[in-house]
């Protein structure tokens, strides 16, 4: 891209309200300069991500999007930076693919003084949910997947929301894969990368349905959801039944009773027993042993790995405990890869638990926090591994990790359908739930 004034930059992400995040050029085919946001109307495309001239051909654009999707080295330019095709040059073109000069129709007025803004120090940028995979839903509170994503973003900003839960909600909202939602949008199937299995999350609150257990596929998880809908008074067409998309889910659950007098937790447990009675028990996934210390590629990191990495301040999402501290030029991050991390090529960062942040002088800036490293070097130091990392151990219930009434014994967040739903992104936390015990039917 050519910015207003002639400087070259690459587009890292598309943002809402027709704005973009860009990073300035520092040399031939190198874009390591200042990261800042600007209105898209004040830039001109001078090279496509594959190095070719700009085009208005929709078929060409679609094919490029398809190549980006299958290339593990690239981001989606919505929630993960896209550096373009690394195998092609970034030399600017003076004209598009039809020979028309670039920039000839620029507005001579120019942008306002406050249009150009630095990237936030904590790396938190708004998510353009409309640019992510979307599908229409039917018969429920949410019209489509985009509405669910936006609801999760709204929940993340709700007063009193815990930082870890907010981080999780934003991650799910920005997931660049299709979300596995029930047809009515009330339930979502998410994968636990530590076990390879799937579980259900209530879309109203983003909390995990603990009593439903885990499933060997998203289809089975959602099939269970359909059976649960019928057992709570719904029909085969998904109308009626308990509304897990309600934002006041805990309040609704505290008074709800089935036709048999069960509360919602007892109904979920009974439904799981009925569901399992007609299906074979899945085999337990194998576990792996990793030894350290050693230098490894970031692509092979798995949940439970203990790692150490030094990054720039803009490469991590700083915990709230450091909000009153000046950010150094570099910070060393030590922690354990969260159960929610999904390993593989193209993953530039990872959520970490029990993190210690140390400045270049050796001063400890934070300890025991959950931190999402957004970008890390290709090689990191792995010092060990915690075998069989349990997602429930990643979270806290109540202030400062205290246990409150309603917190589940195995998952210190809540004994309702809801513990925060760990997925491929960040560790999560949730406030204690007032839901009644699953063993109580009246």
Image (tube, rainbow, N blue to C red):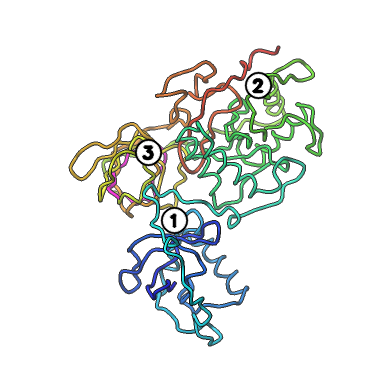
Above or below for 245 versus 149 = above
**In the current view of this chain or complex, which residue is farthest to the bottom?**
99
Find residue 115 and report its horizontal and vertical position in percent. Answer: 45, 62
Few, some or many residues within 10 Å of mark 3 (<14, 14–19, 20+): some
Q: Which corner quadrant holds the C terminus?
A: top right
Label 1's element?
Answer: loop
Few, some or many residues within 10 Å of mark 2 (<14, 14–19, 20+): many
Find residue 29 and report its horizontal and vertical position in percent. Answer: 35, 72
* Comparing labels 2 and 3, the label whose residue is closer to the camera: 3
In the depicted view, which residue is nearer to us: 325 or 199?
325
Q: Which corner quadrant holds the N terminus?
A: bottom left
- Location of residue 435 (image quadrant): top right
Find residue 438 and report its horizontal and vertical position in percent. Answer: 63, 17
Circle 2 residue? 265
Cα separation, mark 1 vs mark 3, equals: 25 Å
Above or below for 334 versus 50 = above
* Comparing labels 1 and 3, the label whose residue is closer to the camera: 3
In the depicted view, which residue is nearer to us: 9 or 234?
9
Label ID, residue 275:
none
Q: Is 276 part of what is drawn in magenta? A: no
* Comparing labels 1 and 2, the label whose residue is closer to the camera: 2
Circle 3 residue? 319
Q: Earlier in the sequence, mark 1 or mark 3?
A: 3
Q: Which residues are magenta?
A: 296-311
Cα separation, mark 1 vs mark 2, equals: 39 Å
Label ID, residue 346:
1
């Amino acid at each position: 891209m050519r910015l207003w004034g002639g400087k070259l930059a690459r587009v890292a992400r598309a943002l809402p309200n027709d704005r973009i995040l860009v990073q300035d050029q520092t040399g031939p085919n190198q874009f390591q300069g200042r990261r800042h946001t600007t209105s898209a109307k004040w830039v001109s495309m001078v090279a496509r991500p594959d190095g070719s001239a700009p085009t208005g051909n929709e078929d060409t654009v679609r094919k490029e999007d398809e190549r980006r999707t299958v290339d593990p080295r690239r981001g989606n330019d919505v929630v993960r930076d896209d550096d373009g095709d690394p195998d092609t040059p970034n030399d600017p073109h003076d004209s598009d693919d039809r020979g028309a000069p670039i920039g000839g129709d620029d507005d001579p007025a120019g942008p306002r003084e406050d249009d150009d803004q630095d990237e936030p120090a904590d790396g938190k940028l708004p998510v353009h949910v409309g640019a992510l995979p979307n599908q229409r839903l039917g018969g429920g509170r949410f019209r489509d997947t985009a509405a669910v994503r936006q609801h999760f973003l709204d929940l993340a900003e709700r007063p009193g929301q815990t930082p870890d839960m907010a981080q999780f909600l934003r991650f799910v909202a920005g997931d660049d894969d299709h979300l596995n939602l029930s047809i009515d949008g009330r339930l979502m199937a998410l994968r636990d990368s530590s076990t390879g299995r799937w579980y259900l999350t209530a879309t109203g609150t983003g909390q995990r349905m603990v009593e439903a257990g885990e499933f060997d596929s998203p289809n089975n998880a959602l099939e269970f959801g359909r059976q649960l809908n019928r057992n709570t008074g719904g029909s085969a067409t998904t109308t009626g039944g308990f509304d897990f998309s309600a934002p006041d889910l805990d309040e609704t659950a505290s008074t709800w009773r089935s036709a048999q007098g069960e509360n919602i937790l007892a109904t979920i447990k009974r439904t799981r027993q009925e569901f399992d009675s007609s299906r074979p028990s899945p085999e337990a996934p194998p576990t792996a042993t990793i030894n350290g210390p050693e230098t490894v590629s970031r692509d092979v990191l798995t949940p439970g790995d203990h790692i150490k990495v030094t990054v720039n301040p803009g490469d991590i999402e700083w915990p709230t405990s450091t909000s009153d501290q000046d950010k150094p030029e570099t910070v060393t991050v030590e922690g354990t890869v969260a159960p929610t991390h999904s390993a593989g090529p193209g993953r530039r960062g990872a959520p970490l638990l029990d993190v210690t942040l140390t400045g270049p002088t050796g001063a400890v800036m934070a300890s025991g926090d959950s931190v999402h490293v957004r970008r890390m070097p290709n090689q990191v130091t792995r010092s060990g591994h915690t075998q069989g990392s349990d997602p429930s151990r990643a979270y806290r219930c109540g202030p400062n990790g205290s246990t409150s009434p309603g917190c589940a014994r195995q998952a210190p967040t809540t004994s309702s359908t809801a513990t925060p739903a760990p997925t491929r992104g960040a560790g999560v936390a949730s406030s204690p739930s007032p839901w009644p015990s699953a063993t109580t039917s009246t």
